Amino acid sequence: MAKRRQPLHPDAPLYHADHPRPVTRRDFLRQGFISGSGMVAGGALLSLLGNPRLAQATLSADLLAMASDAGCALEGLGAGGKIPFICFDLAGGASMVGSNVLVGGRGGYMDDPLSTAGYSKMGVPGDMVPGILDTNPPLNGPNQDTNTSNDDFTDTTLGLPFHSDSGFLRGILGKLALANATNVNGAVIPARSDNDTANNPHNPMYGIARIGADGEIVRLIGSRSSESGGNSVAPAMLINPEWRPTKVDRPSDVTGLVDTGDLTSVLSDPADVRAVMEATVRISNAKLNKVDTLLPPIDGIDKDEVARNLARCGYLKSADIANRFVGVNIDPALDPDIVGDAGIFSTAEFGSSGEFRKTASVMKMVIDGYAGAGTIQMGGYDYHTGDRAVGEIRDLRAGICIGACLEYAARRAARDISNGAIPKPLMIYVFSDGSVASNGNLDNSENGRGKGEWTGDNSSTAASFFLVYNPGGAPIPVTPQPILPSRRNDGVQIGSFRPDGSVETVNAPLAANDVNMLVQTVLLNYMALHGDQGNYSSLFGNNFGSDLDSLIAFQPIVPPAT
């Protein structure tokens, strides 16, 4: 009898005989030899902003005048009035659809389904194809004790349809309360991208910032010390070097953003802290006025004064941070909604997984408004290891992290409502570089769950998806979706798949075969949630022409800016 090998630990590296030896950091990341870090991005001039809700007092008038003269914006506005945005960058080529999110032809997953062979390519065996009777549905819910499926291998608890045995879904519903799941909806975008490369311009964060997302401390957050904040690069035309991400992958990185060293331990009175920081600014400014950088003017620009204003701005923002956050605890590890007996993560979970600590740090920063948008990078998703168990375990963990973000958004919204504040939605975008395919052989181990083994990279099965939590109720599709008996069925599919399980690229949305247009589609939908799609062309050009309206998934959930 063949000996069944034990599934790899979620953090174990992946060795592939058909892949070259890993050389770059990104090679090591997607194969799981190193973990993805978390990062926060902020501009050189406009990053260290305070929280006006927590302000003790404004800085003195002379410092405010100095900031105005230097063009230095203080007092961040928290997400710039925009919906908090988190993207998950699953490095390596995860399976997004078929076994996870459900897709179909132009008529959708129920009316225009994939063939049995197409589902097999996506790792779904013939006896688990959506639409047939499921006599033993899986148990989901926060305690893994609830049948949320439609008893036909589909689950529409989140609006966006998932396979009822999806690893992503099991993880999400393991953290997201079912009452909060009713306020979620989502869309899937069939879209090819290259396998196993960081050169796919997947990351939309610079575009989200261009739309106006900003934070009270930093502009962006992500998961790696890279230009994009993740594994996949950002579209070149969107990059603004001033907004380059700043690294955050643990709670101490979050608290370090507002750390004033020993000052607050020596001085307990916030007024004393402010006085010391203001004195530092004035002394530093006096010295700057005596400095000659010897930088010559260029095209009429006084580079000497620009350099001095940069330095002034740094001192001013440090004083602003100290003033606004003295005595304020932003540590995710100490937030009872995140960690503890009633928290999203138990103390044991939080202590045992760097991925959970990273997720908690990023979601705290974004959802609380300290950062405008962020990337959580997770490594090891190049999981075509000749079994299914490795991929299922890693999909489950990604789902747990996605569900944690959704649940924290819901808890924060409830807290805001109880305090008389306006609750905030959340948009989560999930992408990966390429995808995988199955040869149809089944992994019948406990973690393989009787599903198809992942045996190779395959970009033709690739897709991305996004979920939106709205405290006012699940987002409503622009185009009414068919409502089937006894289920939610209002998720949106932007594009389609062929019956054989391949992305349809003929007469299809531009995103189907162009990652840059995939990002643009996400940006368009982010703007549409604000009712601001009319300004898309002025920010990003006329990329979609007359097709623009057909690519929008949901009606606005927040009023457009005036």
Image (cartoon, rainbow, N blue to C red):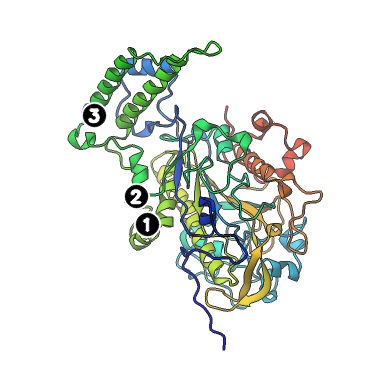
Left or right: residue 149 versus residue 64 is right
For label 2, the crowd category at 10 Å Cα-Cα, with few meaning under 14, some 14 to 19 and many 20 or more, is some
**Residue 140 coordinates in the image, percent (x, y):** 52, 67
The quadrant of the rendering that contains the C terminus is: top right
| Element class at badge 2 | loop
Label drawn at residue 343: 1
- 417, 12: nearer the viewer: 12
Name the amino acid type tagged 3. Answer: Val
Q: Earlier in the sequence, mark 1 or mark 3?
A: 3
Label drawn at residue 273: 3
Q: Is residue 427 above or below residue 28?
A: above
Tell which tag, 2 or 3, sits nearer the viewer. Answer: 3
Q: Which residue is mark 2?
A: 335
Name the amino acid type tagged 1. Answer: Gly
Contact between labelled residues 3 and 2, with CB atoms less than 8 Å apart: no
Q: Is residue 508 above or below residue 270?
A: below
**Residue 380 coordinates in the image, percent (x, y):** 52, 60
For label 3, the crowd category at 10 Å Cα-Cα, with few meaning under 14, some 14 to 19 and many 20 or more, is many
Label drawn at residue 400: none
Q: CA distance from mark 1 to mark 3?
A: 33 Å
| Element class at badge 1 | loop
The quadrant of the rendering that contains the N terminus is: bottom right
Contact between labelled residues 1 and 2, with CB atoms less than 8 Å apart: yes
For label 1, the crowd category at 10 Å Cα-Cα, with few meaning under 14, some 14 to 19 and many 20 or more, is some
